[in-house]
Image: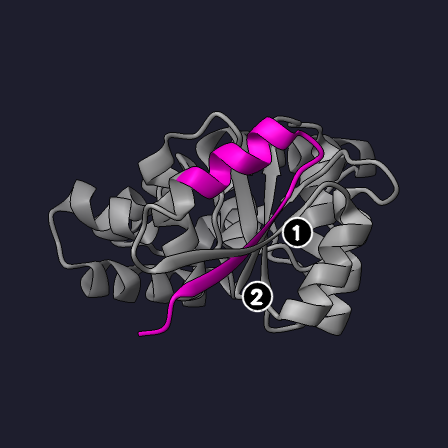
Amino acid sequence: MDNIRLIIADDQMLTREGLRTILELEEDMEVVGLAKNGLEACELAESLRPDVVLMDIQMPHMDGITALKRIKRSCPSTFVLILTTFMEDEYIVEGMTNGASGYILKDIDGDKMIASIRDTMVGQFILPAAVAAKLVEHVTRMKTELGGGPRGRLSTGKLKRIKLTEREREIAQLMLRGLSNREIAEELQVAEGTARNYISNLYGKLEVSDRAQAIVRLHAFV
């Protein structure tokens, strides 16, 4: 299997170099570029076509969200993980709606960061528990301000009529805690493939296609 090729974009040199040191200790990872602002991140992504970009949010010249939008237009197959200490709702929602593959908090354990990058490469959406909680807060507040959920989405009443198995309810709770597929499998003591099947069935019942949508809808249900 080819190495995972990464670009790290952060305006703090110590952060960039620290992350590169951690990631390049892994045999299957290669840091091919470092960027100190969003514009450099875009230019490097367009020339190097990496597998993953770790993208800080607040940077000079071009912020991470603007850079995310450009990279997803020019390099649609590149995964972008938002690397941040900022937990403001608008960053979470903007990142999700513009193609981010998930979020990594800067204080995350190194092993967990590496696992998150590998999970991203197989299509998992990375949503730490702290970010999931902020997302739920945002959705709850928006529903209150708007007097209910947007039309065309699964209503709370319909959610209440969905029949989840005991195992699906257990998985739903673990998803709301921000656990990845691998962590859910470990928690339930089942194979990761089995956990993925349970999660896929849960998505079908909720009429969603990804982890972020599922968490929003499960908040009204579980």
Residue 117 highlighted magenta (yes or no)? no
Q: Nearer the viewer, residue 12 or 187?
A: 12
Quarter assignment of residue 89: top right
| Residue on which the image places disc 1 | 96
Point out the frontmost of discs 1 and 2: 2
Q: CA distance from mark 1 to mark 2?
A: 20 Å
Q: Which mark is residue 50?
A: 2
Q: Look at the numbered disc 1 and give the secondary structure of its residue.
A: helix
Crowding at dot 2, Cα within 10 Å, few <14 / some 14-19 / many 20+, comes out as: many
- Residue 113 location (% of width, % of height): 41, 41
- Residue 47 location (% of width, % of height): 70, 70
6 to 16, vertically: above or below: below
* Sooner in the amino-acid sequence: mark 1 or mark 2: 2
**Residue at image location 59% in from the left, 67% down from the top:** 78
Identify which amino acid the numbered label 1 is placed on: Met
Q: Nearer the viewer, residue 134 or 164?
A: 134
In the image, which residues are magenta? 1-21
- Residue 56 location (% of width, % of height): 67, 39
Please, which residue is most extreme toward the left here?
Answer: 189
Identify which amino acid the numbered label 2 is placed on: Pro
From this viewpoint, is residue 132 visible? no
